[in-house]
Structure formats: C-alpha cells, structure tokens
Image (cartoon, rainbow, N blue to C red):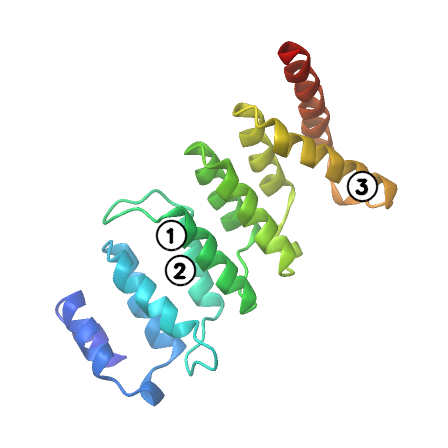
Amino acid sequence: MKCLREAQTVDDSLLLYKELDSSSKSSGICNELLKELFKLGCIDDALHMMDEMLEQDSNFPPDDFTGEVVFGVLGKQERHGRSFADNEIVGLVTKLCEHGVFPDAFKLTQMITKMCWHRKNGVAWELLHVVMRWGGAVAVKAASYNALLTGLRRERDTQRMNNWVVFTCCLFLLGLEHSLDNTILKIILRLNEDVRVIRASSW
C-alpha cells in the first residue's frame, strides 16, 4: 500500500499493482487504486480491476468501500475519460449486488436520477429492479421510486407506467401498501391518469 501511494503516476501504481502476487493483493489496496483510476478517468483499467475483484473465490473481493467508490462514480457526471456503456453500468451494479454489496438509498437515487436525466429510463428501471431482486430492499426508499417514476412520466413511458400501476395494485392486494409513502402513491395515481389520457388520444 505504501509503495502504491508513493508512486508518481497512476501508470506507476498500476505497474506496481500488476507486479504484486495475488496473495499480496487486498480489497483495501484495490479500493485505493480504483478510486484514483476513476478519478483520472481510467475507466478501462478500473473495470479490469473490478473484473479481478469479482472473480469467483477472489482473494480480494469487493467490500462496502468498493461499493462506495463504484456507486459514487456511477451516480455522478463523468468529468474525465469515456462514459460508461449502459451494459457496463447494469453489469457492475448487478455483480456487486451478487456479492452482497448494495448502494445506499442516496447513491441509488443518484444513479436513477442520472439515468433518467439522460433519458435512459430502461437502465434506471433495471438498476432499481436489480437492487430489489438481490435483496437490497433497505436501499430502495421513497426517493428512488420518486426519481424513477418522475422520469417515466416525463418520457411518457406508458408500458413501464402501466407496470408500476399493476405493481402498486398488487401491493394493496397483499396488504403491503404501507411500504409506499404518500408521495409515491400520488405520483402513481397521476401516472395512472396519464396512461388513460395517452390511450384516449391514440384511439
């Protein structure tokens, strides 16, 4: 770790890292280097390191700090380097969730808001469902729902709007409506009305 910190450039750090024996690598070392790689826009190098960490039986698997770094980057606007491809975003979040590393409510909402802002509602939809599917329900708060629903309504995404209406009806039938706050319920009711208007205008 000390040698990596004393390296003059990120290229020097990467060279030192690659020379390390697998048994000498740790999640802490990878996390520090990941943070620098993302900061400098070295996306491909960072993704390659993530692939190593996510390998089965890795000696240096991702931990909560890895999640802090990755989810934080995915929720912000890229300042350096290339942008993430949609499949890279969904893939990273999915693999981290598979390892039990979930975004907190704030970072999940950040990611969803960013995707919707760039009119990538499909990616935002998938991110929310990936987190829910792998058991990160603690991260799925009202703000995350609101961000996605607002994005769907802005783009008049009737198919997914319909799905949310059905989802909400199922919650009521199961007696789980308490899991939604009043803000979400109001948005969904408005979405339901929007769907009716769009359908009527298409007839």
Residues tagged 1 and 2 counted as in contact (Cβ below 8 A): yes
Residue found 23% across the figure and 48% down from its top: 80
Three-letter amino acid code of the residue under disc 1: Val
The amino acid on which the numbered mark 2 sits, given as a three-letter code, is: Val
Choose mark 2 or mark 3, whichever is in front: 3
Label 3, secondary structure: give it: helix
Q: Which residue is mark 1?
A: 73
Disc with the residue nearer the chain's start (2 vs 3): 2
Q: Position of residue 87 (x, y in %)?
A: 42, 51
Q: Mark 1 and mark 2: span between their CA atoms?
A: 6 Å
Secondary structure, mark 2, is: helix
Give the labeled residue for mark 3: 170
Residue 132, quarter of picture:
bottom right
Q: Mark 1 or mark 3: name the one nearer the start of the chain.
A: 1
What's the distance in space between the residues labelled 1 and 3, CA to CA?
34 Å
Numbered label attached to residue 69: 2
